[in-house]
Image: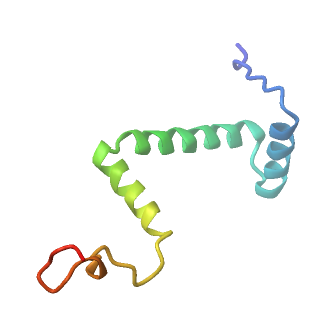
Amino acid sequence: MSEPQLSVRSTKARDLAHALARRTGQPINKLVELALEHYDRELRQKSAHTPADTLWELMAEGRRSVPPGTTSAHDDLYDENGLPK
């Protein structure tokens, strides 16, 4: 009995598969399996995140665009008694 076949009609996928096969010495079917397993693991890890994890990631991403030394104190908007200027 022969193995089930997978057919992917993509020049880019074919070129990448052949280039990786030459570089690694692995057969293309093994490279496809490894790539799909890697992608599956990555998706499972992402789906294991809680909504809070996603929020923390978004906050960290937003913080990277804030210049160093920036604070949220807004002291310049208030007088010595804490009232708006």
> Is 19 on the left or on the right of 83, as rendered?
right
Q: Looking at the picture, how far across and down is residue 61, in whole percent?
A: 46, 61
Answer with the quarter of the image where residue 5 lies. Answer: top right
Q: Looking at the picture, how far across and down is residue 20, in whole percent?
A: 79, 51
Residue at (77% x, 40% y) in the render? 28
> Is 68 on the left or on the right of 77, as rendered?
right
Q: Looking at the picture, how far across and down is residue 22, in whole percent?
A: 84, 53
Q: Looking at the picture, how far across and down is residue 6, in whole percent?
A: 73, 23
> Is 85 on the left or on the right of 54, as rendered?
left
Residue at (26% x, 81% y) in the render? 75
* Identity of the residue furthest to the top in this view: 1
Frontmost residue, 57 versus 9: 57
Task: Examine the rendered structure and indicate whether residue 4 appears above or below residue 54.
Answer: above
Task: Examine the rendered structure and indicate whether residue 56 appears above or below residue 11.
Answer: below
Frontmost residue, 66 versus 21: 66
Q: Is residue 50 shown to the viewer in this render?
A: no
Instruction: Name the image quarter holding the C terminus.
Output: bottom left
Report the label total: 0
Frontmost residue, 30 versus 54: 54
Residue at (69% x, 18% y) in the render? 4
Answer with the quarter of the image where residue 7 lies. Answer: top right
Residue at (72% x, 36% y) in the render? 29
Frontmost residue, 53 versus 2: 53
Instruction: Name the image quarter holding the N terminus.
Output: top right
* Identity of the residue furthest to the front in this view: 85
Q: Is residue 49 shown to the viewer in this render?
A: yes
